[in-house]
Amino acid sequence: MSKHYFPKQEGAPPSLSVTVERQVRFEEVDPLAIVWHGRYPSFFEDARVAFGAKYGVGYLDCYRNGFLTPIKKMHVDYFRPLSFPEPFTIEGILHWTPAARLNFEFIIRNGEGEVTTTGYTVQMMVDTEQNVLLIPPPFIRDFLDRWQAGELS
């Protein structure tokens, strides 16, 4: 993949990523024996959950700190199908932004390493009463400071 969905910002730290290994389950395929297109958002979710666990910014971490991160936008590009019981990986990449949002890019590769699907999500930040946050809450501000200082890898 040569073009990212989110352009690199001047002075931004390198993106952070996580890779999840999976295998296509029988329940995920359609009558044509390929992964049904509606399953890909849950694959993206697998990467987001693994990312949160790796970097300490999971959904429950956010909730305990008084805010939520619902999906505002999602996009998927399909290039080739995955089939049962094919192994595959999901790479989740968080791109830098100082805004109160999370810009995730996803790259799904089959067992041969070929890109099968790419996509992205944008998650906004809201307080527990669903009020949109205009600046990152202190918990995320700390995460961004550590990221920018090169303390995360």
Image (tube, rainbow, N blue to C red):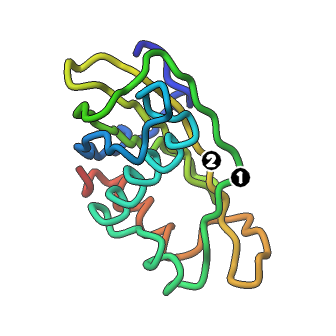
**In the rendered view, would you say 116 is above or below 101?**
above
Mark sitting on residue 36:
none
Most extreme residue toward the front, as rendered?
31
The disc, 1 or 2, on the residue closer to the chain's N-terminal end is 1
Q: Residue at x 63, y 54 (%)?
A: 99
**In the rendered view, would you say 127 is above or below 76?**
below
Query: Where residue 151 sits: x, y (%)?
Result: 25, 57
Q: Nearer the viewer, residue 46 or 87?
A: 87
Q: Residue at x 53, y 32 (%)?
A: 119
Q: Secondary structure at mark 2?
A: strand
> Marks 1 and 2: CB-CB under 8 Å?
yes
Query: Where residue 116 sits: x, y (%)?
Result: 40, 21
Q: Quadrant of residue 81?
A: top left
Mark sitting on residue 122:
2
Viewport quadrant of the N terminus = top left
Badge 1 is on which residue? 72
Q: Nearer the viewer, residue 74 or 153?
A: 74
Query: Where residue 54 sits: x, y (%)?
Result: 27, 61
Q: Residue at x 42, y 43 (%)?
A: 28
Check disc 2: other Cα within 10 Å, few if <14, some if 14-19, many if 20+. some
Check disc 1: other Cα within 10 Å, few if <14, some if 14-19, many if 20+. few
Q: Amino acid at mark 2?
A: Val
Q: Quadrant of residue 37?
A: top right
Query: Where residue 2 sits: x, y (%)?
Result: 42, 13
Q: Amino acid at mark 1?
A: Lys
Most extreme residue toward the right, as rendered?
131
Q: Nearer the viewer, residue 13 or 47?
A: 47
